[in-house]
Image: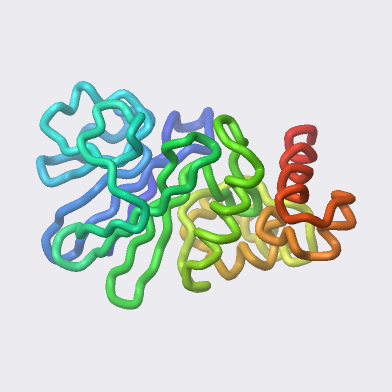
Amino acid sequence: MHIQSIPMWTGTSNNYAYLVKDDKTNDAVIIDPANPPEYANRLNRSTALMPDTDLSEFKNLKVIGGKDCEAVSTTPKHGETFKIGDGISVKALHTPCHTQDSICWFMEDGSEKVVFTGDTLFIGGCGRFFEGTPAEMHKALNETLSALPDDTKVYVGTLPLETDPVKKLQSFAENNQQTQGKFTIGDEKQYNAFMRVDDPTIQKATGKTDPVDVMAALREMKNNM
C-alpha cells in the first residue's frame, strides 16, 4: 500500500487529501479531495473518490462516501468492506457527529493498518460537533475508533493538547511539517484527552465524571481556547 499526502490550499491551511494506491495493480482512491485543482492531474479511470466536495467535473469516476456527499454513487453501510486492487481491504466506519454522514476508512494490506479519520479524530484532538452531540463523538472516538488495533496509523493532523505524554509529539510536530500517518490509535489513547474521558485527571479538569459530559466539557473548553 502506497500513501501520498496531498496538501489542500497549500500555504493557507493544514488540510490534506490522500492518494492510496495498491502496489500490485496501481488501482487507487483519493480521500477527502477538497480542492480539485491540486489533485486533478493525479486521477485516472481506476480512481475512486471518498469526498466532501463538489466533484461534478469528474463524472466518469466512482464516488464512495456519505449519503450527503456531492455526486456520491455508493454509500457503504457501517462495517461494510471492499477492496482497492488485489491487496487493500477497506472497512467503512460510520462516525456521525462533525457531520451526520461522516465515515472513517480503516484499511489493511498484509500487516499494515491505517485509518483515515477526516474531521472526526485529529492528532491530539477531535472535530467540532457541527451536526452531532457529545454522545455521538464519544461513541465515534471511544467505541468505534478506539476498537481498532493499537498499531493502526492515523492519517490526519492538528495541534496537540498540552499534556505530559504529548511532549514527544509536540517535539516531533515542531521538527516535521507533516504528522499524519506518524502516530497510531494506541498513541491517541495515551495523549488525546477526547479519548481519555475515564481518566481521573481529565475528569477533574472538566469537573465531570460521566464520559459523555466529559466529552461535552472538553469540546467547550477547546472551542474557547
Query: What residue is at 66 percent from the left and 59 percent from the top?
Result: 195
The image position of residue 103, as x and y in percent, is 41, 46
- The mark total stands at 0
Q: Where 76 falls versus 169 (above or below)?
A: above
Answer left or right for 122 relative to 67: right
Quadrant (top left/top right/bottom left/bottom right) for the N terminus: bottom left
Q: Where 217 falls versus 112 (above or below)?
A: above
Colour style of the rendered protein structure:
rainbow
Query: What residue is at 53 percent from the left and 32 percent from the top?
Result: 13
The image position of residue 67, as x and y in percent, is 33, 34
The image position of residue 217, as x and y in percent, is 78, 43
Instruction: Give the camera-side residue of 89 and 147.
Output: 147
Answer left or right for 93 relative to 129: left
Quadrant (top left/top right/bottom left/bottom right) for the C terminus: top right
Q: Residue farthest to the bottom?
A: 111
Answer left or right for 211 relative to 108: right
Q: Where 151 falls versus 41 (above or below)?
A: below
- Where residue 223 sits, quadrant-wise, is top right
Instruction: Give the camera-side residue of 87 and 42.
Output: 87
Query: What residue is at 73 percent from the left and 51 percent from the top?
Result: 161
The image position of residue 220, as x and y in percent, is 76, 37
